[in-house]
Amino acid sequence: MKPRLPFDPWTIDTVYGLEPVIEPGASDGPDAIGSATVTCPWCAQRFQTAVDVSAGAFEYVEDCQVCCRPIDLAGEVDDRGAFIRLTASRSD
């Protein structure tokens, strides 16, 4: 019988240089704090997205899960590094 490898999904992602997949609401990742609700500025539909504030405030582009248009997301943190809010705007 082959020994089972001690790699969890996070370790495998790191070894292969992949971005970890974080399911909305999951809190078992090393840096994930959970999820936030986003209202798409294009189609006005609401969806959940993962937030990671391990490096402080952040900005990135994510496609809407409904209409697939790009959204600029900006996350704010307080002085202690706790998540405050997520702002979504059109990426044009």
Image (spheres, grey):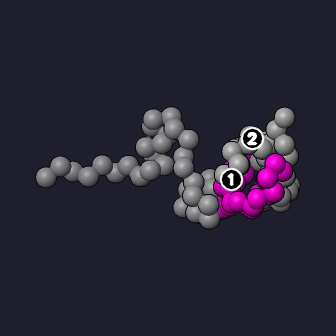
User: Horizontally, is 79 left or right of 18 in the view?
Assistant: right
- Residue 91 appears anywhere in the view: yes
For the C terminus, give its image quadrant.
top right
Name the amino acid type tagged 1: Val
Expressed as whole percent of the image width and height from the top left, the position of residue 29 reads 56, 56
Which residue sits at x=62%, y=60%? Answer: 24
Look at the picture and state if 70 lies above or below 53: above
Q: Along the line of sight, which residue is nearer the eye, 36 or 63?
A: 63
Element carrying mark 1: loop
Expressed as whole percent of the image width and height from the top left, the position of residue 68 reads 69, 45
Element carrying mark 2: strand
Q: Along the line of sight, which residue is nearer the eye, 82 or 38?
A: 38
Which residue sits at x=73%, y=42%? Answer: 69
Look at the picture and state if 77 lies above or below 69: below
Residue denoted by label 2: 70
Based on the picture, tell me whether residue 83 belongs to the magenta stretch. no
Expressed as whole percent of the image width and height from the top left, the position of residue 27 reads 59, 63
- Residue 52 appears anywhere in the view: no
Residue 85 placement: quadrant: bottom right
Q: Are marks 2 and 1 in contact (CB under 8 Å)?
A: no
Crowdedness near tag 2: few (<14), some (14–19) or many (≥20) residues, C-alpha within 10 Å: some
Look at the picture and state if 59 lies above or below 35: above
Residue 77 placement: quadrant: bottom right
Expressed as whole percent of the image width and height from the top left, the position of residue 67 reads 71, 48
